[in-house]
Image: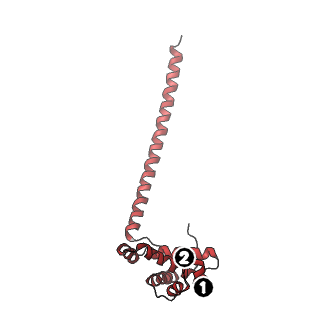
Amino acid sequence: MSEEIPLKPLSKSDIHKLETALMIATLLREDVLEKIRESTERLTWIDSLAVAAGALARARAGMTASQIADDLGRSEATIRRHLSGKTEAAKLVEETYRRFVREGVKIELPLGLGARVEELKKRVEELEAKLRSEEEERRRLEEKISKARQIAEELMKTLSP
């Protein structure tokens, strides 16, 4: 499921891939999660991150501030603030983008979530093993029942006049 995320998007699809990767990777940063937890204006904060991610992805595709504003349905002034790094959201998204450039596009789960995912994977493996064992036991019991039926049918034939 590893799909290539272009750092210099060439199509609308590429723009959306980069925009989504920037948004998710920035949102999952511990410092950003903490800011969102503490914020009384969570939706405004998240919206600002989304606009910053959208603006950056479109700018990397070569769109002008005016085109980006039209595409995102925001004012040109708002887009310019994001593109010039004057908003906190823009700074965070830009940091994420620079990390993508340095390290490649990797979206990491925060420590708590990553550990939980590993825990769940282990549990799924345990349940799959138990299911295989139970299925094998069911097959053995079905074979015994089948043999018992055959024996019962043979006895009925033998006992029938």
Front-lying residue, 47 or 134: 47
Q: Quick check: can you spot residue 148?
A: yes
Q: At x 61% / y 86%, what residue is drawn? A: 64
Percent across and percent down for residue 111 are 38, 70
Quadrant housing residue 30: bottom left
Amino acid carrying label 2: it is: Glu
Amino acid carrying label 1: it is: Ser
- Sequence-wise first label, 1 or 2: 2
Would you call the spot at circle 2 few (<14 residues within 10 Å), some (14-19), or many (20 or more)? many
Residue 93 sits above or below residue 110 on the image: below
Q: At x 51% / y 30%, what residue is drawn? A: 146
Q: Secondary structure at mark 1?
A: helix
Front-lying residue, 109 or 53: 53
Residue positioned most to the front? 75
Q: Secondary structure at mark 2?
A: helix
Residue 160 sits above or below residue 124 on the image: above
Percent across and percent down for residue 88 are 43, 83
Residue 43 sits above or below residue 56 on the image: above
Which of the image's four quarters has the C terminus? Answer: top right
Which of the image's four quarters has the N terminus? Answer: bottom right
Q: At x 49% / y 35%, what residue is drawn? A: 142
- Residue topped by disc 2: 19
Percent across and percent down for residue 43 are 44, 72
Q: At x 61% / y 83%, what residue is drawn? A: 67
Would you call the spot at circle 1 few (<14 residues within 10 Å), some (14-19), or many (20 or more)? some
Residue 66 is labelled as: 1
Q: Nearer the viewer, mark 1 or mark 2?
A: 1
